[in-house]
Image: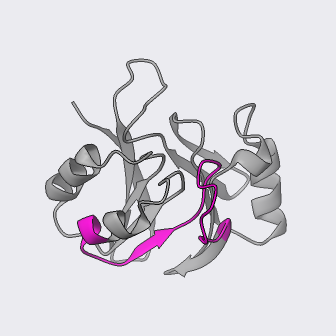
Amino acid sequence: MKILIVSDTHRRHKNLERVIQKSGHLDLVIHLGDAEGEEEEIASIVGCPLEIIAGNNDFFSRLDKEKELRIGKYKILLTHGHYYYVTVGTEQLIADARARGMDIVMFGHTHRPCIEQENGITALNPGSISFPRQEGRKPSYILMEIDREGEAHYTINYLK
């Protein structure tokens, strides 16, 4: 199973289109917020099932603020992250994910990609595909692949 994880597109879709073409077959796309009312446009671009949540810039959105999913053996929490103060660290986010029995928590908001593992919880942030803020400022996304044994593997990828 191949899953594309993106966040913070902010009404800019050219890079998302490039990533979709580059990635080949996808089983699922996860968007972690700040689509700014472009959910239907994003759904038409991805061409596979889409899970999308609201971010801090999705002011009048009817999207869920958070979602809990099960993918294979993994319990996953989707959140934009701003309610957990992720700009100053992931401690609160990871503690809440652990308390809720999650294996993985996915978040956005910071526009900086990261993969962290702490006490059995994996925290993933794909960064921003439209407005990156990390050193080098390359648009970023994460590909998550579930292998034949059911194990998840993650890679942060950058557009040039």
Instruction: Measuring from the top left, give residue 148's x and y in whole percent.
Output: 33, 77
Query: Where on the picture, by quarter, is residue 49?
Result: bottom left
- Count of all numbered marks drawn on residues in the image: 0
Q: Which residue is located at x 31 percent, y 75 percent?
A: 27
- Viewer-proximal residue, 43 or 139? 43
Instruction: Measuring from the top left, give residue 88's x and y in whole percent.
Output: 75, 31
- The vertical placement of 26 against 140, above or below, is below
Q: Which residue is located at x 15 percent, y 57 percent?
A: 21
The magenta stretch spans residue 64: yes
The C terminus lies in quadrant: top left
Q: Which residue is located at x 54 percent, y 55 percent?
A: 33
Residue 3 appearing in the image? no
Query: Where on the picture, by quarter, is residue 140?
Result: top left
The N terminus lies in quadrant: bottom left
- Viewer-proximal residue, 85 or 104? 85
Applied colour scheme: one colour
Q: List the single residue furthest toward the top.
A: 135
The magenta stretch spans residue 11: no
Q: List the single residue furthest toward the front.
A: 60
Most frequent secondary structure within the magenta stretch: loop
- The vertical placement of 113 against 61, above or below, is above
Residue span colored magenta: 44-66
Instruction: Measuring from the top left, give residue 45's x and y in whole percent.
Output: 25, 65
Residue 29 appearing in the image? yes
- The vertical placement of 106 against 84, above or below, is below
Instruction: Measuring from the top left, give residue 153's x and y in whole percent.
Output: 41, 58
Q: Which residue is located at x 49 percent, y 26 percent?
A: 133
Query: Where on the picture, by quarter, is residue 59?
Result: bottom right
